Amino acid sequence: MRNALVPLRDGVIARAQREADAELRVARREAETLIAEAREASSAAVDEAVARGREDAAAARSAEEARRRRSERAVELAAQREVFEELIGEVTARLSQLDDQALRDRLRGRVRSALGSEAEVVDAPGGGVIGRVPGRLVDLSFRTAAARAVEELGADVERLWTP
């Protein structure tokens, strides 16, 4: 009887082997599909990370460029201010050379006509006069006069620092 069951057993084993082989082929195809999908997802993630990295780098470069331009502008403005202040100093020095009692008397007269005879009038440091009454001030100092004169030059003063 054992011998009679051999073909049946061989048939069952062959069938089980075919079914296992079929299941193995399906599992391999599914694994290959999953691996391909994982590779695509991985590639897409890398591409996205590279794109974000480039965008971040571009933004960082742009921010750095803006900081550099602001810094250069600050240096430029400081240099212009220095030239402006030097010019005011030179004009103030020239006005100081003109200082005499007659000029101070005329400046005191202007202060009193603007503020009244009760105005307190004092000599300004560097020349000229400053007058005060409560709530009002008239500055006729040489420094203020020089600053006004230079400011009135407007765009013409920019020729001092423009090539």
Image (cartoon, grey):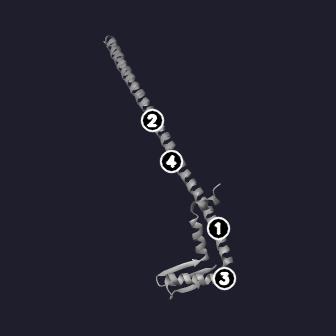
Q: Amino acid at mark 3?
A: Asp
**Residue 100 bears which disc, if any?**
3
Residue displayed at 47% across by 85% down: 134
Residue placed furthest toward the bottom: 118
Q: Nearer the viewer, mark 2 or mark 3?
A: 3
Q: Whole-Å distance between the Cαs marked 2 and 4?
A: 22 Å
| Nearest-to-viewer mark from 3 and 1 | 3
> Residue 44, labelled with which disc?
2
Of the numbered discs in the image, which one, if any, rests on residue 87? 1
Q: Which residue is mark 4?
A: 59
Give left or right: position of 30 versus 125.
left
Which residue is depicted at the point 38% across and 27% down? 30
Badge 4 density bin: few <14, some 14–19, many ≥20, Cα 10 Å: few
Mark 2 in CB contact with mark 4 (< 8 angstroms)? no
Q: Which of the 4 image quarters holds residue 12? A: top left
Q: Nearer the viewer, residue 26 or 83?
A: 83
Q: Secondary structure at mark 1?
A: helix
From this viewpoint, is residue 123 visible? no
